[in-house]
Amino acid sequence: GLSEERQISFSLEAIVGGLYYWNDVGVIQRYDFGYALATAELYLTPQQAGAGVCVGCHAVSPDGRKIVVGKDIPAPAPYTEFDIATKVAVQGTNGPVAGAGNFFSFSPDGGQLLYSNGKSIGWRDANSGVDGHSQVVANGTMPDWSPDGSALVYSASSAPPPVAVPGITGGSLYVAPFSSGQFGSGTLLVQSQGENNYYPAWSPDSQWVLYNRSASNTDSFSNTVDGELWVVPKAGGAPTRLSAVSDPGWSSWPKWAPGVHTANAHPVMYFTFSSNRAYGLRLAAGGTTQLWMAAFDPTKVGNGDPAAPAFRLPFQDITTGNHIAQWVAKIVRKPCQDDGACESNEKCKDGVCVPEQVK
């Protein structure tokens, strides 16, 4: 058979770092782009995290040293912060840094943690665990702290939920500035006109917000029907639909890879998202959710589609649903002197535990 002709272009820099993602059997997997021929690793199980059946919603500090993990069913779920390398709970002033929440975001230096129960957004010290700002945003959820540290973006419903919830409907997006150690009041970035805008994420240059939109206003927690990907400048203005990655089908949980690249003399930034779209002849549309990746060219906003067609990340298990690909600039690994210090799927090489397939 013959397929349609396709054009392929490449950015000039290698993808670095790695990502941590949730596998729907209830574990967190990770992939390290420093070991390109290795498969994804099993990183954290419910037993290791102190959960009953599942570890799912999670966020990773930009330096790759800490991970906060929600345990079992959200609404909100108990969470604990762990040291990435050792998987030991981070010890604060009064014991492990822990609480309850559905959504999380670390400050750029990893020293502060924003958390949300789906109704409001709080702020605690990620080292001491001290929670002195339980109401940074009274009505808001899905926080994301910009890489340059200057602002918080979040989604808020026009009708605040009476209790904590894992999803949102009728969401609008807001940006709150951060300076002198305090967040200011949120200002409107994207106004809902009856649709649902949710899961906002800052670009690595802190100039764009990528987010999901449901034209049918389906709840974000259960939407597997019409999740599209849109982008809006930090300064506001008309949002842009990323048609190349939205048209094939439902998409969710967009997350940016670190760094700005160059392709065809244009700046390019990459992002990942979850989708149950068809994958060639191996997966039919509506089947297993996989992680997909695409490029974004900001110079094309207002002049064509700024997104390139998406490609499926090849290291995934095709039989499991995969979601929430949280990126880091570096995968921090456990130090070791011999294989005995490493887990069963790892070996000791050059003083750290690496995937056993690494040569």
Image (cartoon, rainbow, N blue to C red):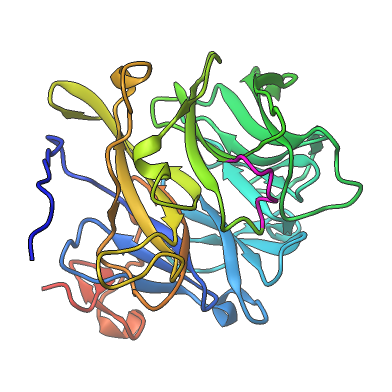
Q: How many marks?
A: 0
Magenta span includes 199: no
Q: Give the range drawn in magenta.
A: 214-221
Please indicate whether residue 137 sits to the left or right of residue 317 in the image: right
**Quadrant of the drawing holding the N terminus:** bottom left
Q: Nearer the viewer, residue 6 or 208?
A: 6
Q: Can you name the residue that lies furthest to the right here?
A: 162
Residue 249 percent location from the top left of the image: 44, 52
Q: Which is nearer the eye, 86 or 99?
A: 99
Vertical position of residue 32 compared to residue 134: above or below? below
Q: In which quarter of the image is the C terminus?
A: bottom left
Q: Which residue is drawn at 75% across and 48% down?
A: 118
Magenta span has 219? Answer: yes
Image location (x, y in percent) of residue 202 = 49, 32
**Residue, far front:** 1
Please give the name of the residue rendered at 39% of the width and 25% of the height, measured from the top-left corner.
Answer: 205
Front residue of 166 and 260: 166
- Residue under the point 12% across and 56% down: 3
* Up/down of 321 relative to 269, above or below: below
Find residue 326 and report its horizontal and vertical position in percent: 45, 52
What secondary structure do most residues of the magenta stretch adopt? loop
- The reply, left or right, for residue 249 in relation to residue 39 is right
Res 260 quadrant in image: top left
Relative depth, front residue between 55 and 23: 23
Q: In the rendered image, is residue 62 in sight?
A: no
Task: Determine if residue 234 is in view.
Answer: yes
Quadrant of residue 160 within the rendered picture? top right
On the picture, is 262 further left or further right than 165? left
Counting from the top left corner in percent of width and height, residue 314 is at 25, 64
